[in-house]
């Protein structure tokens, strides 16, 4: 029996900010190859794509520093077998904002579904702008697995996907190559939760109450 085919799509900026919130400071040492294998969990990985806004040199120190940092990250990703897709960066009063990345992810989700490239899309992003694309993909009988971060998951995406996997700090620490020994933990098998399981779990979707039949009530009185 053929194994399930998956594509892994990572919103780079989204993941970067979530990891920073968890106080990860050595992001260039993150083992993306092992991370992809962890997410695959025995399934066949068709592609692993990292989406990021491209930083261009603008003749100032800040943009040059960002560009050099991004070049190091890109080389790191490519050495680990990841494909990189670019959006673009806009500057507003010294603040750089990523644009177009969600469009690239949505297009790849849809194209892959319509071309039957994958069975399940593993989405590492909490961008709710992707929900319409998720609906279209599921309409094509493809599954979408949302990878969220336990400290701040996207409940909008949780409600609209087939499978949910949430990762905490301890789960992610094992992918930092030079993490302190006392902080490392054995990588666990991802705790995936299907749509049906979520609907039966208190706190996500309440289980419907079915009153006992009249026959059962009679037995209860005896």
Image: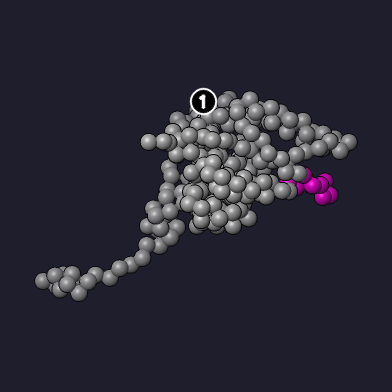
Pick the residue in front: 3 or 156: 3
Q: Is residue 71 above or below residue 121?
A: above
Pick the residue in front: 121 or 182: 121
Residue 185 visible in the shown view: yes
Left or right: residue 96 compared with residue 76: right
Instruction: Name the residue that disc number 1 marks.
Output: 181
Q: Residue at x 82, y 50 (%)?
A: 92
Q: Is residue 102 magenta?
A: no
- Which of the 4 quarters of the picture holds residue 50? top right
Q: Secondary structure at mark 1?
A: helix
Left or right: residue 119 compared with residue 72: left
- Which of the 4 quarters of the picture holds residue 56? top right
Residue 189, x across and y down, in percent: 42, 36
Residue 54, x across and y down, in percent: 75, 39
Residue 20 visible in the shown view: no
Magenta segment boundaries in residue numbering: 89-98
Q: Is residue 96 magenta?
A: yes
């Amino acid at each position: 029996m053929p194994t399930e085919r998956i594509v892994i799509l990572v919103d780079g900026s989204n993941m970067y900010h979530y990891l920073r919130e968890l106080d990860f400071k050595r992001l260039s040492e993150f083992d993306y190859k092992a991370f992809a294998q962890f997410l695959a969990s025995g399934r066949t990985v068709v592609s692993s794509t990292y989406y990021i806004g491209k930083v261009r040199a603008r003749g100032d120190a800040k943009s040059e520093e960002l560009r050099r940092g991004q070049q190091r990250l890109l080389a790191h990703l490519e050495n680990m077998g990841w494909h990189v897709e670019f959006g673009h960066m806009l500057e507003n009063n010294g603040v750089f904002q990523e644009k177009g990345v969600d469009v690239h992810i949505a297009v790849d989700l849809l194209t892959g579904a319509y071309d039957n490239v994958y069975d399940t899309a593993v989405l590492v992003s909490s961008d709710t702008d992707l929900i319409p694309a998720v609906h279209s993909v599921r309409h094509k009988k493809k599954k979408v697995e949302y990878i969220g971060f336990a400290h701040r998951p996207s409940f909008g995406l949780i409600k609209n996907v087939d499978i949910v996997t949430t990762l905490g700090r301890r789960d992610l620490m094992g992918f930092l190559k030079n993490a302190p020994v006392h902080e490392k933990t054995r990588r666990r098998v991802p705790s995936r939760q299907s749509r049906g399981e979520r609907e039966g779990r208190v706190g996500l979707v309440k289980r419907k109450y079915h009153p006992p039949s009249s026959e059962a009530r009679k037995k209860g009185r005896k």
